[in-house]
């Protein structure tokens, strides 16, 4: 079966309190795409965050001494730096124009995932949007709602677009995943020549998120979700946290 990725169209601009699951169900039904087993719905974290009201008014923040110092190093608004620090457990790197931190979920990313794009025009320079309160819990909840409505057992990935160490450009990344083997341990399987694999862990949820984001877009496309169909896997579900490299195994910090 070929793998297809279909962007879900006409999802309205999400506001605090909106029911994201209901919006996804309506979009899937308009497209006549009733999910079935092994389908995966990929959802941009931005609409999950918006529905949770994860906005921060920069004017409400008083920068700490650390935020002021980092603002001088990076050239960023001290209030934005304060917002970043409040979402972080560690500042990994900082230089002009860039702050890399570890978030409370163990994700290492620029600006703690705080975003200012695709907000309303009135938000420019005034409000920022944080990552979901708990992206894994959001993925679990969306899966439960979609499974119940469509009487299926599907996968749900909450994705964000991030940069990567040693590579330029951004790609989709799974920050929450339900019903899929986020990290697929294939050690012990045979390769084409019959040799047993010894070190093959597949970042399955990240690969699906990256592929889906190519169709969803990252600018003004207005397609914050997609249905991925045609995948297959023979591994138990694992949450997105399985993809986070333990700090003790990180050779670069």
Image (tube, grey):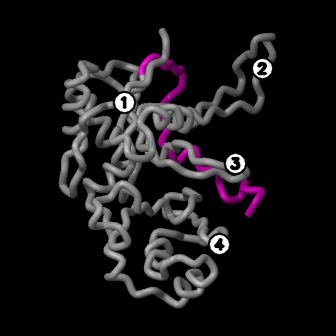
Q: Is residue 188 left or right of residue 17?
A: right
Q: Nearer the viewer, residue 250 or 196?
A: 250
Secondary structure at numbered mark 4? strand
Disc on res. 196: 2
Q: CA distance from mark 3 to mark 2?
A: 30 Å
Q: Main secondary structure of the magenta part?
A: loop
Per the rendered image, the range of residues in magenta is 229-253
Q: CA distance from mark 1 to mark 3?
A: 26 Å
Q: CA distance from mark 4 to mark 1?
A: 36 Å
- Residue highlighted by disc 3: 167
Indicate yes or no whether the magenta region holds residue 165.
Answer: no
Considering only vertical position in the picture, is 218 above or below 57? above
Disc on res. 94: 4
Q: Pick whichever of labels 3 and 2 is earlier in the sequence.
A: 3
Q: Nearer the viewer, residue 214 or 131?
A: 214
Q: Pick whichever of labels 4 and 2 is earlier in the sequence.
A: 4
Q: Residues within 10 Å of mark 3 (few under 14, many from 20)?
A: few
Q: Is residue 6 left or right of residue 233?
A: left
Query: Which quadrant of the view contains residue 142?
Result: top left
Q: Position of residue 179 (x, y in %)?
A: 41, 32
Secondary structure at numbered mark 3? strand
Q: Is residue 49 left or right of residue 92?
A: left
- Residue highlighted by disc 1: 7
């Amino acid at each position: 079966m070929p793998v297809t990725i279909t962007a879900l169209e006409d999802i309205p601009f999400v506001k605090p309190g909106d029911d994201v699951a209901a919006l996804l169900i309506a979009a899937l039904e308009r497209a006549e795409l009733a999910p079935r087993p092994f389908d995966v719905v990929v959802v941009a974290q931005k609409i999950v965050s918006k529905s949770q009201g994860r906005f921060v008014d920069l004017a409400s923040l008083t920068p700490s001494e650390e935020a002021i110092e980092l603002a001088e190093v990076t050239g960023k608004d001290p209030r934005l730096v304060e917002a970043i620090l409040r979402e972080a457990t560690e500042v990994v790197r900082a230089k002009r124009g860039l702050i890399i931190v570890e978030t409370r979920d163990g994700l290492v990313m620029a600006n703690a995932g705080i975003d200012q794009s695709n907000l309303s025009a009135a938000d420019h320079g005034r409000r920022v949007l944080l990552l979901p309160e708990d992206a894994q819990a959001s993925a679990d909840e969306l899966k439960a709602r979609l499974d119940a409505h469509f009487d299926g057992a599907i996968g749900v990935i909450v994705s964000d677009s991030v940069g990567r160490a040693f590579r330029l450009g951004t790609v989709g990344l799974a920050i929450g995943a339900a019903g899929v083997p986020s990290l697929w341990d294939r050690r012990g399987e045979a390769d084409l020549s019959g040799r047993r694999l010894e070190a093959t862990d597949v970042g399955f949820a990240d690969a699906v998120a990256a592929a889906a984001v190519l169709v969803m877009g990252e600018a003004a496309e207005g397609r914050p979700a997609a249905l991925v169909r045609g995948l297959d896997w023979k591994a138990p579900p694992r949450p997105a946290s399985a993809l986070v490299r333990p700090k003790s195994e990180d050779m670069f910090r």
